[in-house]
Image: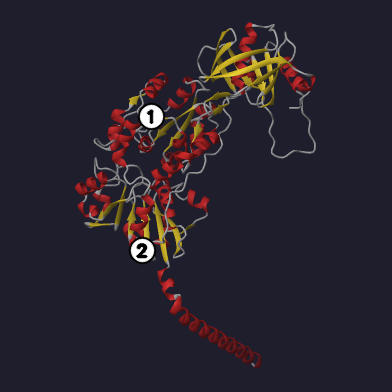
Amino acid sequence: MNDAIAVSGQRSAVSGQRSAVSGQRSADDRRRATGGGRQAAEQKSVLFAARSATALHRLLDVIPVFAGDDRIRHRRFTLVPGSEFDIDALAAVERAGARTIPWAEAVRHPHDLIVAASPKGDLDRLTGPLALLPHGAGFNKAVPYEGSARTASGLDPAMLLRNGRPIADLHALAHPSQADRLAVGCPPAAARSTVVGDPTLDRMLVSLPRRGSYRTALGTGGRKVIALTSTWGPESLLARRPGLPAELAAGLPHDGYQLALILHPNEYSRTSAYDLREILEPALASGMVLARPYEEWAAVLVAADAVITDHGSSALYAAALGLPLIAACDGGDELLPGSPMAELLAQARFLATPADLEPALAAHSPSAVRALAAPAFAEQGAALERLRTELYALLGLTPRAGELVARPLPAPAPASHGPAAFAVRTEVHGDQIDVDRRPAHADVPAHHLAAERERAAEPQTQSASLLFRRRTRTAVPHPHTAAPTAAGWTARALADHPGHRTAAAELTASRWLLRRPETPLLLLRIEPCRTGDRVVRTDPAAVLSGVHAWLTDNPYPRLPTTLHCRVGGQVYRARLAPATDEEADHEL
């Protein structure tokens, strides 16, 4: 009993202390209110509501509008339910470390501002002013099973209105023509529209000075980057012409062209990145790059020399960059007549076979293609500034002073190795050798098969006339090592594969040791091609194939000698001389 009274007394004392502290805090709060209360009242929260990965990526391009403003205390993301493509919707947010909240929580609490990039879903259940952005370039497509028939997705009154009232307080559009189309189809929503431009295009434009570094990351060298862009659905490039990537990989010279595939994020959600890689394996094994669906696709477009496309909006971005556009399919019933994309495809050349690529590139006019993209994009370079003005008005805040510039795109991830084996066509004219390499599985006549011993499949190494080994590059040296010498490896390669004529081992990027049965060990030095202010280097294995073909015709050469190998339209000088003992003993 006494213990209970003592405990009760302690609790009362503690409670009294808490009350005193609380009183002090209240007094402190009242004092701060005279100086800092105004700032506290201005602190706002912004909810980014995404229904799919496509919409989410658009919202991430808008976030810099609020950069550096401590009044925006909370930037939260939520997943609007109801989309079949919501599997990957929040992956980019998780990678960025941003905070997400469940939809059930998002609809329970009011928000100072809501930003979305699709009118689909129950956005009207959210409380707070809503700003609605497009989730692509232009409004070019009608989705047959959603909304009103033959109405552009994103401009459909069935989705923009609830009980006759607009769901959004702001429609931020990219071009005045979009506002005109909205005024015809949905006047109540058009009354709340304004033209701000396209933040995603602005990121590409500000990234143009980085084009060279993007190409370096991709391992492009002197090749032309040909980007294939495929939207989602039954009319997409990948659905209509699923074999086109592999057909181009086999039909275009590997050293003249580098392929990159840009897929709509919905394809990743529908199929999974793993399944896509398996489906695309023939083209990927031939060296094609598969761009990731956030940011990297745009960096690849900046790096590209031409685009083969369907009716997806990526083509409009490519046109705005002045790139050659070649149509692979027509969009079918999904493409809306009179839309910017329809006009673009109507003017584009059609690609029936890989042989159609070069004529299309030769006929390209950058100014003409930019003019075709003009109806989709206005206010270029000013989208974030204009959008900031509109969004801060909805927040009831004055924007911070200072210029707002779009963030450049990060460089693409380094491209993986290309093919491990090549079918090589060559033409030898004196000391001039033309080299044309295709993936080993390409059904083309060839002078020889060349295979990288450590990577190629055993049937390829058994059939190859030229075996080569690239340098082993380890990030961390190990205390215990064992490495063959260049002379030892080339001798073993020919001994293990009877009938092979040439084995070559890389000493440095420009120096290779060659072994043939009828000649002493040879050293090959490969020089880069200098064109104007550029130094271009090719895959040394391509020059090896040219030298192999020349040695086949000249088995007992007079040394030293200089050869000229034409690879991918560029000429590279190759010097052959007897190898020294030091070069023969080089550790691989």
* Left or right of 44, for residue 210: right
The amino acid type found where label 2 is placed reads: Leu
**In front: 49, or 545?**
545
Where the N terminus falls, by quadrant?
bottom right
The secondary element bearing badge 1 is classed as: loop
Q: Viewed as shown, does residue 585 lie left or right of 226?
A: right
Q: Which mark is residue 395?
A: 2
Task: Give neighbour class at mark 2: few <14, some 14-19, many 20+ (Cα, 10 Å).
Answer: many
x and y percentages locating residue 514 in the rendered image:
70, 17
Q: Position of residue 10 (x, y in %)?
A: 62, 88
Image color mode: secondary structure
Q: Which residue is mark 1?
A: 324
Which quadrant holds the C terminus? top right
Q: Secondary structure at mark 2?
A: helix
Residue 577, image quadrant: top right
Question: Residue visible at 30% across and 56% down?
Answer: 170
Q: CA distance from mark 2 to mark 1?
A: 42 Å
Tell me which amino acid carries mark 1: Pro
Residue 440 at least partly seen: no
In percent of width and height, residue 461 lies at: 64, 19
Q: Who is closer to the viewer here, 122 or 573?
A: 573
Closer to the N terminus: mark 2 or mark 1?
1
Q: Residue at x 39, y 24 (%)?
A: 361
The one of 266 and 65 positioned closer to us in this rendering: 65
